[in-house]
Amino acid sequence: MKNVPLAIDVVEAKTSKIDSVDFENLIFGNVFADHMMECDYKDGQWQNPVIKPYGPIQLEPSAKVFHYGQAIFEGMKAFKDDDDDVWLFRPMANIKRFNKSSVRLAIPEFPEDLFLEGLETLLNLDRDWIKKGFGNSLYIRPFVIATETGVSASPSNAYKFMIICSPAKAYYSGEVRVFFSDKYSRAADGGVGYAKAAGNYGAQFYPTNLAKAEGYQQIVWTDANSHEYLEEAGTMNIFFRVGDKLLTAPTSDRILDGVTRKSVLTLAEEYGIEAEVRRITVSEIVEAAEKGELKEIFGAGTAATINPVKGFGNKGKRYELPELENSYASFFKKKLMEIQYNKTEDKFGWRYLVKKD
Ligand SMILES: *Cc1c(COP(=O)(O)O)cnc(C)c1O
C-alpha cells in the first residue's frame, strides 16, 4: 500500500450560523455547529481527511449503507470551564469503542490519533459553540457509513467517516417512566448489541412507540431468551437501587459498555456505595418495589449523564418510585459534572484538555 497523506485539510466557513441559534431553547440534536470532519476510505486506506463547513453530502442511491445498514456511530461531549478551556470526558474510551463497533460491522478501523487530532481541530474551530455553565455542552457525533455503490449484499470497499457537532443544553427529558419488555428484544447472544450499530436504534422505535402509547417514555430491555433479566435501556445503561445497594447488569454481547456506566461504578467504589454487577431479575425488582425497598432506577449515558426514572411498568402493572431527598442519581450526576466542567480534582484522569492550536 502506498502511503497517502493524513494531514488534515482545513477549509473554514466564510460565515458563521451561530448568531441565528437560540442557545437558551435548544432541542437536543437539532442544530449543528459550523464545521464537520470528513474522511474517506478507498483503495484499502483512510485518506484525505478534511474539516470543512457543515453541509449536505452526496451519495448514490445504491450506496450500501442505504441497503444493508453498514453504519456505526459514537456519542461524546465537550465542556467549557470558567476559564474558557474545553474538555472532553474519557475520549479514548469512545474512540476505542468506535473501532470495536466497526470491527463487528466489518468496517475498517479508523486511526485513533487521526480521530483525536481531527476532533480537537474541529472543536477549536467551533469553540464558540460550546457555552459555559453547568449543563451546557457540545454533543459530538462521530459516525461511519458504507459508501460503495452497488446492491450486492457484501461488505463495502468504501466508507465515509464523519464528525458533526450539536450544541446541547442540560438534558431534561421530563418525567421518565419505563416499561420492562416482555415481548420485543433489542439484542441477542452473538449479535450486535454491544456495538453502536445504527440498526440497533431503528429497530427499537416500533416497540418504543407501543410503550409510549401506554404512557411510558422508554423501554428497559430484557434478555431475549427468557425476558427475565433486566439489561439496559435504548441508549442508556440502567441502575437499580434496592435499599442502599446499587445494582447493574454486567456488560456482554448484548449490552453496551457505557462510559457513564463504568464511571458511575468507579465513583460508587470511591464513595463507599455498595454496588453489585450481576444479572438482575425482573421478579426481584418487582418484589423490591412491592416491599418498598426499591428506592431508585436511573439511566446512565452521555446525552443525559444520569436520567432518573419515576416509575416502571411490568406485565400490565404500574409501579411508582419514591421522591428522594438524597438520591444516588443526583449524587452521581453532580460528581460526574464537577469532573466534566473542571470544578474539582480529576483523581481518575478522566478529563482531557483540548489543545488550543
Ligand atoms: C451509547 C449507549 C449507552 C451509553 O453509553 P455512554 O458511553 O455512557 O454514552 C448505553 N446503551 C446503549 C445501547 C447505547 O447506545
Image (tube, grey):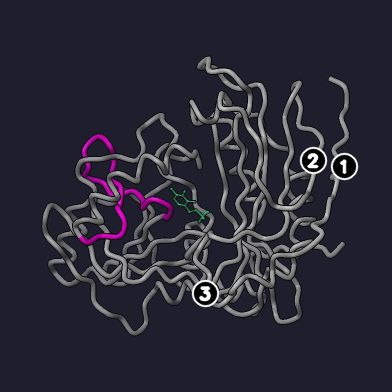
Q: Please give the label number shown on residue 25.
A: 3
- Quarter location, residue 132: bottom right
Q: CA distance from mark 1 to mark 2?
A: 7 Å
User: Is the residue marked by circle 2 packed among few (<14), some (14-19), or many (20+) residues within 10 Å?
Assistant: many
Point out residue 119 in the picture as x, y percentages from the top left corner.
73, 53
Mark 2 vs mark 3: give the one in front.
Answer: 3
Mark 1 residue's CB less than 8 Å from ligand 1: no
Tell me the kind of residue under disc 3. Asn
Residue 35 in the image, given as x and y percentages of width and height: 73, 55
**What is the CA distance from the residue labelled 2 to the residue labelled 3?**
33 Å
On screen, residue 183 versus residue 66, left or right, reads left
Q: Residue at image x 23%, y 72%?
A: 321
Residue placed under numbered mark 2 in the picture: 49
Determine which of the numbered discs, if any, sits on residue 98 in the image. none
Specify which label sits upstream in the sequence, 2 or 3: 3
Q: Quadrant of the C terminus?
A: bottom right
Residues rendered magenta in the picture: 215-236
Residue placed farthest to the top in the image? 152
Is 265 situated left or right of 91 in this image? left
> Residue 199 at x, y = what percent?
44, 37
Q: Which sits earlier in the primary sequence, circle 1 or circle 3?
A: 1
Circles 1, 2 touching at the beta carbon (< 8 Å): yes
* On screen, residue 63 above or below 274: above
Q: Secondary structure at mark 1?
A: loop
Q: Which residue is mark 1?
A: 7
Q: In the displayed structure, would residue 122 be above or below residue 59?
A: below
Q: Position of residue 248 (x, y in %)?
A: 37, 56
**Amino acid, disc 2:** Pro
> Which mark is first along the chain, 2 or 1?
1
